[in-house]
Image (cartoon, rainbow, N blue to C red):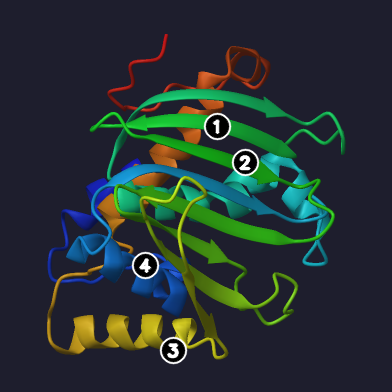
Amino acid sequence: MERVLKCKKKYHHLKLKYGFNHRYHDSVREAINIVRSNQLGDIVNARGVYGKSNVTPFEGSWRSERKYAGGGILLDQGIHMVDLMRLFCGEFVEIKSYVSNNYWNCDVEDNAYVLMKDQKGRIAILHSSATQWQHRFLLEIALTEGYLELRGFLTSTKSYGEERLVIGKRSELTTGTEREEILTYLNDNSWRDEIYEFAETIINDKPVLNGSVEDALATMKLVYGIYWADSDWRKKYSIRKPDLKLRNK
């Protein structure tokens, strides 16, 4: 990615966009609109679980080999949750993590357990897993005046269940919120919208809004920051510290 960025700077007239497809799902778009409009106040923290049942899915066993894939479940799938947390919270400056491959015994990770602190001191918790026997996507965002829960994700296999956004408003009741609003999304137009946006970027010579080289590099650095934060994993696979202003030691 660092080499790509150097090359891209030589060709300002060309457009390069990376596939940040999760950003185009309707549940994510609606949640972003709510957060940015300050309807529920400021973000307090975030929790995310993204998992599937194997480190070698039907696409092929190359995903379990470091020399081909570069990493396991975190780099393959969890990176999308990392990107969404960046999208909601901004940049993270401190990371604590445990990374393991104890179950599938491949040379890539099958679980990553992560604590991250952003520039405002807010905490994000992430579990990226290849031992989640029922595929799962869940992103919870607590705000000062309520909460958002993104549950499930529309995919071609339907293995992550229905895509829903749960909206709750904080009340003075000691038992919690009085009611929740649940939005259910039946159609996945994310791929179409992503391609259309890229086409418009090219045709009208606009800057890339989502998935720029800089965006991709920042997310990739954060993933490798998670690898590096686990001292045992760092030593085991000679993980180089990314160029991030991380406060972990």
User: In the picture shown, does residue 241 fall above or below 194?
Assistant: above
For residue 114, the mark is 1
Residue 187 visible, this orientation:
yes
Category of crowding for the residue at label 3, using alpha-carbon neighbours closer than 10 angstroms: few (below 14), some (14–19), many (at least 20): few
Decide which of tag 1 and tag 3 comes sooner along the chain: 1
User: Under tag 2, what secondary structure?
Assistant: strand
Residue 210 visible, this orientation:
no
Decide which of tag 4 and tag 1 comes sooner along the chain: 4
Asked if residue 147 lies left or right of residue 202, the reply is right
Identified at 42% across, 8% down, the residue is 249
For residue 31, the mark is 4
How many numbered discs? 4
Q: Nearer the viewer, mark 1 or mark 3?
A: 1
Q: Amino acid at mark 3?
A: Arg
The residue indicated by pointer 3 is 192
- Front residue of 135/171: it is 171
Measure the C-alpha gap from mark 2 to mark 4: 20 Å
Q: Amino acid at mark 1?
A: Val
Q: Amino acid at mark 4?
A: Ala
User: Under tag 4, what secondary structure?
Assistant: helix
Q: Nearer the viewer, mark 4 or mark 3?
A: 4
The residue indicated by pointer 2 is 127
Q: Nearer the viewer, mark 2 or mark 4?
A: 4
Q: Amino acid at mark 2?
A: His
Query: Is the Cβ of the residue at disc 2 closer than 8 Å to that at disc 1?
Result: yes
